[in-house]
Amino acid sequence: MPNLIKTDVVIIGTGPIGLFQTFELGLHGLQCHLIDALPEPGGQCIELYPDKPIYDIPAIKECTGEELVQRLMDQSAPFNPVYHLDQTVDALEKRGEQDFLVSTSKGQQFECRAVIVAAGAGSFTPVRVRVPDIDQFEGGQLLYRVRDPKQFAGKRIIILGGGDSALDWALSLVDIASELIVVNRTERFRAVESTVEKVQALATEGRLELLLGAAKSFTEEGGILKSLTFEMRDEEKSMRTIELDNLLVFFGLSPKLGPIEDWGLDLERKAISISTETFETSVPGIYAVGDINTYVGKKKLILSGFHEAALAGYAIKQAFNPDQKVSVQYTSTAPSLHEKLGVKH
């Protein structure tokens, strides 16, 4: 069979929980390969808030999403996890007890004994701006995510949206852009109150313009987006045309489970039902950790996902060795763990 890789566990998803899962499996001496549709590890932390501070990671007072991802990758590095990025899992076949065949969109296949779904809320598709034919500028002047803020230096920027991402980027770009206009569709903002207050203060100071309206049409010249025309949220529903260099749209992301829905797993409201004792799904040998799963009392926190990954690691080790008791070992005192981690004690 071409392109076949044999391993103990395949992890679907490389967000913080998937990354920490590699560490927990490594402590048990299990090798894993990770698959993700994104071109780099990190999941939502990298896609949505790489520069946004996170405050609720134990013992880390503050870190950005990007810093958290890098710390987790460094932590699991002694176990040599292998990443397969920019590809999706198209098929998952259970061939027998502890025998799975996983196939990806790039033709790669994996033979493994267990599968862990750590895919967050599934794959995310940005909610697009509804202006006819404007998608021709997507990836150029029209962007749904920001990779390099420096590219907007000295540019006329319009930001659409009123949530955390839209207003966070407004605060980040206000001193970089030559002109910054934020347009929300209603008077209701979905960002945290302190962020809304900061943006409104900047508008009062004249450092950015805050408008209420909806984009209706655009003008272009020689394949270059020149302006957007808005229907304003005033009594007259007046029209206003604004020239721009770049359009950033943050209407949110639409989660999709994709092929996961076809794997025969018990689902509840687009989430995977699991046993809280093992975090195993309704299909023996397939586990689910992080935001993708659901159970009574579920909290969608990175902190909770770390706990789930630890329990899933023990459950998988026990399933692989049913006649052997899997005891709890502590990284502070267990010589065998020190050896696996490559540290001296």
Image (cartoon, grey):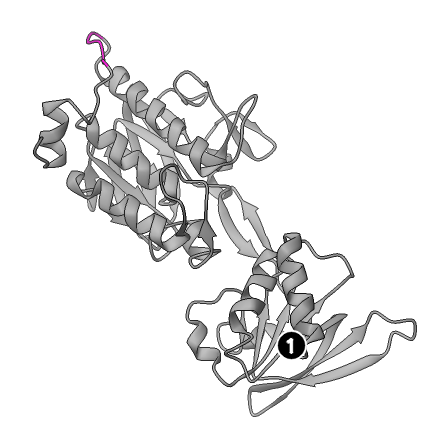
Q: Quadrant of the N terminus?
A: top left
Which of the 4 image quadrants contains residue 287? top left
Residue beneath disc 1? 208
Q: Name the one closer to the observer, 218 or 304.
A: 304
Where residue 221 sits in the image (x, y, percent)? 60, 92
x and y, in percent, of residue 308 in the image: 40, 27
Compare residues 345 and 300 and report the one nearer the observer: 345
| Residue at the extreme right of the image, as rendered | 235
The residue located at (27%, 36%) in the rendering is: 22
Task: Name the amino acid, label 1.
Answer: Leu
Residue located 15% across and 22% down the image: 333
Q: Which residues are magenta?
A: 323-327
Q: Residue pushed farthest top?
A: 323
Q: Is residue 66 left or right of residue 83?
A: right
Q: Is residue 175 above or below residue 269?
A: below
Q: Is residue 277 above or below residue 2?
A: above
7 horizontally vs 167: left or right: left
